[in-house]
Amino acid sequence: MGKPKQQVISRFFTPKPKHEEDPSTSTTPCTPPPKIAAIVSFSPAKRLRTSQLISPQNKLSSSYDDHPTKPTKTPKLSTHGDNPHTPLPNPTLHQKFLDKLLEPSYHLLEPSKCHEIANLKYTPLEQQVVELKTKYPDVLLMIEVGYRYRFFGQDAENAARVLGIYAHMDHNFLTASVPTFRLNIHVRRLVSAGYKVGVVKQTETAAIKSHGSNKLGPFSRGLSALYTKATLEAAEDVGGGDEGCGSCNNYLVCVVEKGIDLEGCGDDVKLGIVGVEVSTGDVVYGEFNDNFMRAGLEAMILNLLPAELLVGRPISKQTEKLLLAYAGPASNVRVEDVSSDRFSDGGALAEVMSLYEGMQETYLLDVQEKEEAEMKMHECNQIAIQGIMAMPHLAIQALGLIVRHLKQFGLERVLCLGASFRPFSSNMEMTLSANALQQLEVLMNNFDGSESGSLLHCMNQTLTLFGSRLLRHWVTHPLRDRNMIGARLDAVSEIAESMQTHRTSHTSVLEMEGADVTSSQAEIHHIIVSVLSTIGRSPDIQRGLTRIFHRKATAAEFIAVIQAILIAAKQLQQLCIIEDKSTNLQRETLHSVLLRKLISIASSSTVINGSAKLLSALNKEAADRQDLHNLFIISDGKFPEVAEGTRRVELANEKLDSLIVVHRKQLRIHKLEYTSVAGITHLIEGIKLNLDFNGSSN
């Protein structure tokens, strides 16, 4: 007998037809598609192949269950012998087999398509991240974990792109990290890219956690600060640095609009705009009717060049188109939509008035001054409230939206005592149109949009940052009054002449009649140049004063600003008018009336005495070392509460120092000393101990 014919493997996958027919006359029914045994793949190319295999399989399986005998266009694997005992393949079992061995494709990771993703097991830290992102969905969060700040999920992807750092998968999230001591630099880079950055810090230390009820859980964390481009310079921890924005303004501008119900107006609207420079306290407001081209809105935007835009919804398409054209992807201007419906019925004025009432209570609780201080504060508030009441309706509505926006940063105080409200257009100044600003290249050139080569760039010879900002306002808002133009010209000309004379006659010898007068003028020029040099080397006084008003300045920054004011005031005092009442003689050292007036205010006894009093109570060396315990000078009986706290701290330090002797004996380390890590003092370095010495483990 011959050897039996070996059966092909395809017979086990081909179902047998129900009826025996002649092969020459019958058509063979098509079979379901073959099942793939196993393809283990993790490469991007093979993930695509996997998804292509899984998706059609679900469709074919469902159709196969509904119509098992319906022919399909899928070709058979083989036409050789049939096996009557071969069962039909089970699609459900095969799908489980694929799900177990194959990595799911990206489209299967959506919650609607994958029920397992919704039940992911998060680590305690990841659970905190999920809760924080749910609470702050529009904020890029930097979460403190140990000695690094970590980003998670989409925040990690954005941070990796902006900061140029590495992002990788860790458990369930994409993550990236930066060291804690680089927080200032990285926050500025993220904010400059247009992000709203939130810093989440640990609210408890390891020592407190180990002795608390949360010893087995993760560190407690909470949002400690928010930063945006418009609020960065006035913010705590990272604001006021030398790497700041310098002379440029960072206005926060809110735009609201209202339709004009008049025939023939078409798409004309009434706009209300408020711009706030949080770092300097400058507040600009305006309300005007604008045409279809939104020329008035464009002029105000080009004048202020806002770093952030608050858009009060609802808003027309023409207005939205212009704002989005300015805040394009390449501009890094942040745009936030807010609803203005809540302030449509007078709620904006109530919001602003409540801010002033809260400011009055806070001021009294913090200062506890006498009746004179209370009366002065009440008078200042009344002046500010009267100015707000005189603002147009839509401008007040925009101001209310800005107040609510700044409350989340803790910077709403800028709209109270320290703010200077001014209308965008007035009778004393010209308001240049957008066409004039662009065609005349007043602020930027038409080649690449930078300041280089513009009118402002050619005129800017200032020595200080706040002087450069003031010149920018002068260029964009020329004076209209002839007397004011002449007064400003005389003041600037005298300063420029003093600087030029000081350079040319620095080494000259005076040997002529009237040498005393010439020597006096040379001395005046020397003093002016000295004052300008001193102020030029000092920090940004304007922004420094605003940070002090916000209570965000450090001790070293406070001393630097007040000291610069005191030195400049003492030097300017030499240029004031000296009047001798006994001889009825008056010697004018300066010719410009406006310049003499400004110098007399800056060098008044109130400024000098107040600055000297503040500096006499602080220790500059301790401020430079960030030693807050020795910052206040309490030797002359001032600050009794600080003196009592210092005494208690010294007693606690003495007790801790006495314990180090006990620890040396217990650990048998004679040179054991306390160490400090990340600002936490009196720590003992961890040592692997042999507890079984002398038969005792105590």
Image (spheres, rainbow, N blue to C red):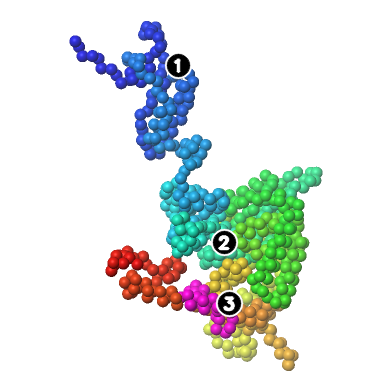
Residue that numbered label 2 is attached to = 232
Sequence-wise, the earlier of marks 3 and 2 is 2
Query: Where does the image place residue 173, in percent across and percent down from the top left?
Result: 46, 47
Outermost residue, right direction?
A: 263
Q: Is residue 329 above or below residue 509?
A: above
Q: CA distance from mark 3 to mark 2?
A: 33 Å
Report whether residue 157 is seen.
no
Sequence-wise, the earlier of marks 2 and 1 is 1
Residue 630 on the magenta segment:
yes
Q: Which residues are magenta?
A: 624-653
Crowding around mark 1 (Cα neighbors within 10 Å: few <14, some 14 to 19, many 20+) is: few
Instruction: Give the structural element (helix, strand or loop) at label 1.
Output: loop
Query: Going by the image, does 451 lie left or right of 311?
Result: left
Which numbered disc covers residue 577?
none
Report whether residue 328 is seen.
yes
Residue 92 on the magenta segment:
no
Outermost residue, left direction?
A: 1
Query: Going by the image, does 229 lie left or right of 32?
Result: right
